[in-house]
Image (cartoon, helix red, strand yellow):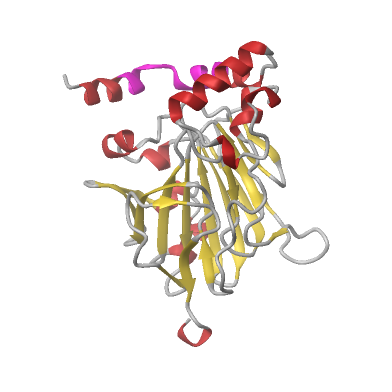
Amino acid sequence: MSLDKFKIAMQYAMPKHFISRVVGKLAAAKAGALTTTLIKLFIKQYKVDMNEALHEDPAYYKTFNEFFTRPLKEGVRPMAQGENVITHPVDGAISQLGDIVDGQLIQAKGHDYSLQALLGGYEDDTTPFLGGKFATIYLAPKDYHRIHMPIDGTLSKMIYVPGDLFSVNPLTARNVPNLFARNERVVAIFETEIGPLAMVLVGATIVASIETVWAGTVTPPAGSDVFSWNYPTQGENAITLKKGEEMGRFKLGSTVVLAWGADKADILDDQLPETVTRLNTAFATIKESEEL
């Protein structure tokens, strides 16, 4: 058995939820010098650029989670210019992107998966995105782990979808079928000037928490049923976020999947699989109204 096959087999075998929750408790612990030592080792192992962090000193962070979700210095991720620009929501690397064909998204060569399954199984939520575009962005351990809005949007729905907790690294994406539609995830659907925009926050092994700015911690605890929440899109209780504002965060890394409808916006030609992404840089352009 090759090393890659062994790594995949181990993921199927190990108790991923149990391990993830144990790691989550450790990551939330205030362990003083031990916490600082672990943070320093992590920085060295993954070559984290602390020059970009608002607080550069590892000793500043009381828990590993505080370090992992560290804020950036103001101005290090300047906003791309242009009102018609859709920006990258995270630091990471593009895994796959392109057209949503027959309700399917590309996961990797030889693998695709269902958009309806990804969004929690609701046909009504899926229909606006058919024939549209999608992008999957993988966040590596060294990356900034807050997720921001790629366009102005008003929240209309959030869906919690239970599932597994496979790793979401490129090796696993190439070898585990339906990876993003089988892992635990949180779906946020926003009303925007290009119609509905879905932002799917996908859990993974040792992801201790997925949070949103409006609901706080959505998971853990993990559930066994799909839950959904509808939100008003008008009035004083509407939750509207501007392009570049934070919408959520991962405590330990994962993946974000974006989707929008047909003929709404075009992904830039230089955005390709394995392209490194930086928050607030240009990703796509909105089509002019007469073309919509």
Which residue is depicted at the point 63% across and 36% down? 70
Camera-side residue of 21 and 275: 275
Left or right of 218? Residue 125 is left
Residue 254 percent location from the top left of the image: 48, 37
- Which residue of the protein is positioned furthest toward the left in this rendering? 1
Which residue is depicted at the point 67% across and 40% down? 54
Residue 197 percent location from the top left of the image: 54, 61
Label tally? 0
Residue 53 percent location from the top left of the image: 62, 39
Is residue 82 visible in the rendered structure shown here? yes
- Which residue of the protein is positioned furthest toward the right in this rendering? 236
Give the magenta range: 10-23
- Which residue of the protein is positioned furthest toward the bottom in this rendering? 290
> Is residue 265 placed above or below 37 in the rendered structure?
below
| Residue 24 within the magenta-colored segment of the rendering | no
> Is residue 235 placed above or below 247 in the rendered structure?
below
Q: Is the N terminus in the top left, top right, bottom left or bottom right quadrant?
A: top left
Left or right of 275? Residue 66 is right
Left or right of 1? Residue 96 is right
Kindly report the secondary structure that dominates the magenta region of the rendered protein: helix
Is residue 228 visible in the rendered structure shown here? no
Left or right of 89? Residue 205 is left
| Residue 13 within the magenta-colored segment of the rendering | yes
Camera-side residue of 49 and 188: 49
Camera-side residue of 85 and 186: 85
Which residue is depicted at the point 37% across and 35% down? 169
Residue 215 percent location from the top left of the image: 71, 43
